[in-house]
Image: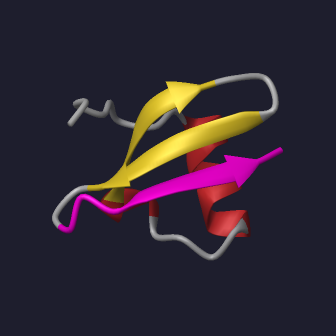
Amino acid sequence: MKQGKRPTKRQKLLMEQNGLNHSEWLVVKSLRTEIHLVHREKEDQLVIHL
């Protein structure tokens, strides 16, 4: 499993707009059209489309 990085302020705002708690998610990949996230504890993966 890839290791995630802490989200930026802009990414935190996008997460909160999508109903996620930014302190529970790490950013694995950030593209122009989507952000790939992984949960800190459960290791669930999620994709947010912009």
Which residue is located at x 51 percent, y 33 percent? 8
Image quarter in which the N terminus is found: top left
Residue 39, image x, y percentages: 31, 59
Q: Classify residue 24 as left or right of residue 40.
A: right
Residue 21, image x, y percentages: 46, 69
Please identify the quarter of the rendering in which residue 23 is found. Answer: bottom left
Q: Is residue 17 above or below residue 45?
A: below
- Region rendered in magenta: 42-50
Q: Classify residue 21 as left or right of residue 33.
A: left
Residue 42, image x, y percentages: 20, 68
Residue 20, image x, y percentages: 54, 71
Which residue is located at x 81 percent, y 32 percent? 33
Total numbered labels = 0
Please identify the quarter of the rendering in which residue 40 is found. Answer: bottom left
**Residue 49 shown in magenta:** yes
Q: Classify residue 44 as left or right of residue 12.
A: left
**Residue 37 shown in magenta:** no
